[in-house]
Image (spheres, rainbow, N blue to C red):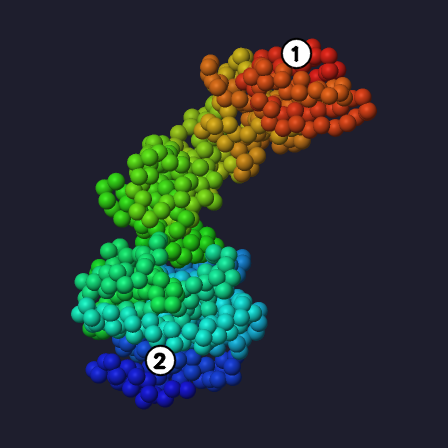
């Protein structure tokens, strides 16, 4: 375990003016707070925060961050409090420590929800001060280094979480060295056999090709020196996880990989980067498609470098990264390499925001994902945002948009602005009209075609690849569904108040919100539309003296009511074309499936314009429309509040089809089905589904779901089918 003076010495190596008293005080406080607590390895728990602090001293971080690392488990695992930390070490360090404290006092339905809520809390703390992330990553790295001491089940869970969240997060922040180690450690536990195999093969290749690597290093350095370019050339072996991921992605064997070794060329200036590239490409042939310039178009984590692959000495593929020393430091240490820390200016204010594109991404991610979603959704969307093999596309005005590989114009539209995504109806890629699901390539210029009032289809959510697009589509879909239910609820209430002879207004409804236990008018309307609140309850909430005049079903003793529904004399129905005793305006107009109300038709037979219909309000699903003669209505005889007066409101010339079902008894001979299908097709009907059942050797029963314009259209099809020789009987099914 690291001694007190050793911690101070590590900090003073890069920061001679470090606050030695502050570091000593933190060491003693944490040691006393953790006392005799032990880790799974049997070591004193206090050794863990010290190792975390040691990792951060390698990143040359400021005093406050090192102290926060020493104290980071005190609030969570000891009796220490935030107030005590603030008093002894200041509010800045107290905020860092609290940001690293997991949520443990709340009850969650699932472990996934708790994991998501903890991660949400962590990201919000990081957005306030990015040093929280640096401590958290160092904490996770030390836990991964000692993961072999914990139980196998927990070992797999922690390794999976590290690979899915923390390693990509380190990469998104540009801390590549830490990301590589986290990935390899996770890979070691998640796929131990693959890890051992690849590690062994890499050792064999290193022994076999060792002289060749030295030759390439010397040859490349010599050629650059001859052109007056001072360069440091180093060869390196790729990591096991990187090798395995490439094998999986490209479905190739280890023997087929030709770029297991890579070389870094560090030069003094950006000009030297491009001069070195020229030397390389004029000396050895370049591999087409393997050149990438991240200096002119940096990655979102501030990574800058030139990548190229050439056929080098011995016909060996050589992968090169050309960068300056400053670029290399940022590539390895990311945001931890920013001069902001080294100068001792440790606040998370505007300077870092301006310097670090990675930090800007983090702030945007938190702003986009922290609102409205459940913890599970937040975790899912953030995972999507973390994996970032990128393509770079442009708007027509030249704005650069970086997207994950596999992104579509829909993702592009939401990356530009949420409103652009919500109103997108088409796209032009490089000036040509293209499907919205086209996969974007590097350098594409994308123009989004918009239509005001458009609502993104719910199916888009499963087709996009960015978390921002998924979250926005889900919110827009929920909002559209809520508007539908609120619209239905308003119509139901207006007709309920009309039947009661009472005045209805939003002001009266707003005054009754406390009695209805809802926060807003829209909440009430949506609840009524979803069937979660009955219209009569709303009337009574506004007019407490009102009592609905409804005779009990026990009054009906001489029959069972309309269409075998007992108590049916207590219900009033509107029939199209008749005003009834309350006038036609009391019935809700039905225009079809694509209207502004959540409507569906009876699953066993449907309904078509011209039918006498009734609506049944199903909680959470909207209105189900049944023909008035449907025997299925008997199931709702004891729920009169769910019955709605509805009427058709289909305009002349409407080209929307409606579902119906017909049952046929046909002669079993070749061509029978073709004859039936031909009749339906000739009458402009559309077959949605066919079920055939052999009743006897000579006859077959067919049940056909068809889409038709109206009742007249359906009757014409039925009449024509009855006239065919192969059809013995046709009836309409109204289930």
Q: Which of marks 1 and 2 is nearer the N terminus?
A: 2
Q: Is residue 310 left or right of residue 548?
A: left
Residue at 34% across, 74% down: 215
Q: Which of 21 and 258 is in front in this view?
A: 258
Residue 326 lies, in percent from the top left, at 23, 68
Q: How far apart are marks 1 and 2 (CA)?
A: 87 Å
The residue positioned farthest toward the front in the image shown: 314
Quarter of the view holding residue 331: bottom left
Residue labelled with disc 2? 54
Residue labelled with disc 1? 719
Q: Which of 414 and 644 is in front in this view?
A: 414
Q: Is mark 2 on a helix, strand or loop?
A: helix
Residue 167 lies, in percent from the top left, at 41, 65
The local crowd at label 2, few if under 14, some if 14 to 19, many if 20 or more residues have their Cα within 10 Å, is many
Q: Is mark 1 on a helix, strand or loop?
A: helix
Residue at 39% across, 65% down: 316
- Residue 532 in sight here: yes
Q: Which of 496 and 344 is in front in this view?
A: 344
Residue 479 lies, in percent from the top left, at 42, 39
């Amino acid at each position: 375990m690291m001694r007190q003076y050793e911690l101070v010495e590590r900090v003073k190596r890069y920061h001679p003016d470090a606050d030695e008293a502050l570091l000593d005080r933190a060491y003693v406080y944490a040691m006393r707070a953790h006392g005799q607590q032990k880790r799974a390895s049997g070591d004193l728990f206090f050794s863990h925060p010290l190792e975390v602090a040691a990792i951060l001293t390698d990143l040359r971080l400021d005093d406050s961050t090192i102290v926060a690392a020493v104290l980071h488990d005190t609030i969570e695992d000891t009796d220490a409090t935030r107030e005590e930390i603030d008093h002894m070490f200041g509010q800045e360090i107290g905020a860092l420590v609290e940001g690293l404290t997991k949520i443990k006092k709340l009850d969650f339905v699932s472990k996934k929800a708790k994991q998501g809520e903890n991660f949400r809390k962590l990201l919000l703390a990081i957005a306030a001060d990015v040093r929280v992330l640096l401590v958290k990553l160092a904490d996770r790295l030390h836990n991964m280094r000692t993961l072999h001491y914990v139980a196998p089940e927990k070992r797999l869970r922690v390794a999976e979480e590290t690979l899915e969240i923390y390693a990509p997060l380190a990469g998104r922040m540009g801390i590549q060295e830490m990301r590589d180690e986290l990935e390899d450690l996770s890979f070691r536990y998640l796929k131990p056999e693959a890890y051992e195999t690849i590690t062994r093969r890499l050792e064999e290749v290193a022994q076999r090709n060792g002289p060749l690597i030295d030759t390439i290093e010397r040859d490349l350095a010599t050629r650059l020196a001859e052109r007056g370019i001072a360069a440091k050339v180093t060869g390196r072996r790729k990591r096991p996880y990187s090798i395995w991921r490439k094998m999986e992605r490209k479905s190739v064997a280890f023997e087929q990989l030709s770029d297991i070794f890579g070389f870094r060329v560090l030069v003094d200036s950006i000009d030297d980067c491009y001069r070195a590239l020229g030397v390389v490409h004029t000396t050895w042939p370049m591999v087409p498609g393997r050149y990438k310039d991240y200096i002119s178009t940096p990655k979102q984590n501030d990574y800058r470098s030139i990548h190229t692959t050439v056929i080098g000495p011995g016909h060996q593929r050589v992968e090169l990264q050309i960068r300056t020393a400053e670029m290399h430091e940022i590539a390895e240490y990311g945001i931890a390499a920013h001069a902001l820390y080294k100068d001792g200016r440790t606040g998370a204010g505007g300077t870092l925001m301006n310097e670090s594109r990675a930090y800007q991404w983090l702030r945007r991610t938190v702003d986009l994902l922290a609102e409205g979603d459940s913890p599970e959704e937040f975790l899912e969307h953030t995972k999507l945002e973390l994996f970032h093999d990128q393509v770079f596309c442009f708007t027509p005005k030249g704005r650069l948009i970086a997207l994950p590989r596999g992104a579509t114009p829909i993702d592009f539209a939401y990356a530009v602005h949420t409103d652009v995504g919500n109103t997108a109806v088409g796209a032009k890629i490089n000036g040509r009209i293209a499907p919205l699901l086209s996969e974007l390539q590097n350098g594409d210029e994308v123009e989004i075609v918009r239509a005001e009032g458009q609502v993104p289809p719910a199916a888009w959510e499963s087709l996009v690849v960015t978390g921002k697009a998924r979250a926005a589509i889900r919110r827009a879909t929920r909002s559209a569904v809520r508007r539908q239910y609120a619209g239905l609820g308003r119509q139901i209430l207006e007709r309920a108040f009309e039947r009661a002879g009472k005045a209805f207004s939003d002001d009266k409804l707003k005054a009754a919100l406390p009695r209805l236990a809802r926060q807003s008018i829209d909440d009430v309307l949506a609840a009524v539309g979803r069937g979660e609140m009955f219209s009569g309850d709303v009337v009574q909430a506004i007019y407490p003296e009102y009592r609905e005049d409804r005779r009990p079903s026990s009054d009906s003793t001489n029959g069972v009511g309309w269409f075998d529904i007992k108590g049916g004399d207590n219900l009033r129905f509107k029939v199209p074309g008749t005003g009834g005793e309350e006038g036609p305006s009391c019935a809700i107009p039905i225009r079809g499936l694509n209207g502004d109300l959540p409507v569906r038709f009876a699953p066993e037979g449907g309904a078509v314009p011209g039918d006498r219909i009734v609506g049944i309000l199903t909680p959470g699903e909207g209105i189900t429309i049944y023909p008035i003669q449907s025997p299925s209505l008997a199931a709702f005889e004891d729920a009169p509040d769910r019955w709605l007066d509805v009427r058709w409101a289909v305009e002349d010339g409407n080209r929307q089809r409606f579902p119906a079902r017909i049952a046929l008894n046909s002669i079993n001979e070749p061509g029978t089905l073709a004859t039936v299908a031909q009749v339906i097709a000739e009458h402009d009907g559309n077959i949605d589904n066919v079920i055939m059942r052999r009743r006897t050797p000579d006859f077959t029963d067919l049940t056909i779901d068809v889409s038709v314009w109206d009742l007249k259209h359906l009757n014409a099809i039925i009449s024509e089918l009855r006239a065919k020789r192969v059809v013995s009987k046709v009836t309409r099914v109204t289930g």
